[in-house]
Image: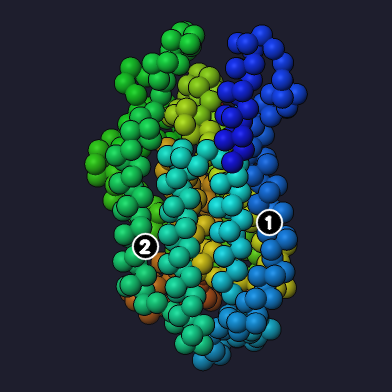
Amino acid sequence: MLTAIYDFWYAAFQAENSAGQEGWAHTFSFLNLFKYVTFRAATAGLLAFAISIILGPWIIRKLISLKVGQPIRTAAEVHKLAELHGGKIGTPTMGGVLILASVLISTWVCARIFNPFVVVCACTMAACGLLGFVDDYAKVKKKNSDGVSSRTKLFWQLVIALVASSFIYFKTEISGFNATAQQIQDGVAGFRLRDNPIGIGEICFPLFKEPLINLGIFVIPFFAFIIVGCSNAVNLTDGLDGLATGCTISVALSYAMLAYLAGHFFLATEYLVIPHNHHLQELAVFLMALAGASFGFLWFNCHPAKVFMGDTGSLAIGGALATAAICTKQELLLVIIGGVFVMEALSVMLQVGSFKLRKKRIFKMAPIHHHFELLGWHESQVIIRFWILSIMLALFGIALLKIA
């Protein structure tokens, strides 16, 4: 919406200039701010936060009236953890609809909504959110923690991920990285360029100036694996009040910065030597909206939580962050920046693998945040320490950009 206002104003401003007169367009020259990605990204974050704060109480009351309380596993299933989490019984779930609404509305208002990077991230987020909503609804209806079967959920996650990955691979504006002919013509001579533009199938990492490997069309299943994996990792992390939400903020802010840098020709190609695509800057608007919405949701989700995001929020956030990482060509860096999510997922895999192979458990309980709870850490200690770890990992990931 803001970009449409700017385009309309700019056309009128140019018309007034060509006619040698000053009219309403000159009076509203401050609308020129709308062309700057930095201004619109900050606006998107603030707007998403405001929407969350304003709509949050109403959505919580609505969820309570619909009796969509979070099912808590019984003592037979989780033993001592049931005592620690007993007070959470009845807390409304499906709060992820608040995050989705805030992000999508803010993106519609502040971003160029037909930008291919914005389209694929927003659509992936919405699709994963819809799948999570169906899963949450099934849990509430059955009044237990068993929602959609794991096979059914995985199938639809793969469908969503493969569609998104195929769009990224075949969409021309996304699949080519480096300078455009117009940028070269506009005076970027003397800046380092690769002889051949980086293709979407090439896998990059900041420590190396050249791509590590070119997977070609086989990058599609690789991207799908990242989207499904990240979506499930965020879902596993969402086990304590505000844990996944706080980690989402640091990851979203990091990738918003990466998107802006990768979309800026001089910073990307000459200073940082990272994959560049001039369409990428717009993705920063979407990611700042996600960060702002997460801040707003955390207002209600911090301990003791008044609402849980449920699979509606966690699957959506994971899908959005993974797609953003792929779009910026920093998919491997997600392992570091999103290290808390990776740690949570790995703890489950190690626990299951160890029990099947050795009939022994590595942790007192998985995901790993429950392990620390059972060690005697208070829930707030676990949450805040994991937030700190997430921030440090995000800073470390950003710092790697200039090492090579």
Q: Which residue is mark 2?
A: 157
Residue sitting at x 46%, y 40%: 114
Q: Quadrant of the N terminus?
A: top right
Nearer to us of marks 2 and 1 is 1
At which x and y percent is residue 350? 42, 67
Q: Amino acid at mark 2?
A: Gln
Tag 1 secondary structure: helix
Q: Is residue 157 above or below residue 60?
A: above
The label on residue 51 is 1
Looking at the image, residue 252 sits to the left or right of residue 115; the answer is right
Looking at the image, residue 385 sits to the left or right of residue 119; the answer is right
Tag 2 secondary structure: helix
Residues at marks 2 and 1, CA–CA distance in whole angstroms:
28 Å
Asked where in the image residue 57 lies, by quadrant, the reply is bottom right
Residue at the left extreme, as displayed: 217
The reply to whether residue 124 is visible in this rendering is: yes
Asked where in the image residue 399 lies, by quadrant, the reply is top right
Residue at the right extreme, as displayed: 27
Q: Amino acid at mark 1?
A: Ile
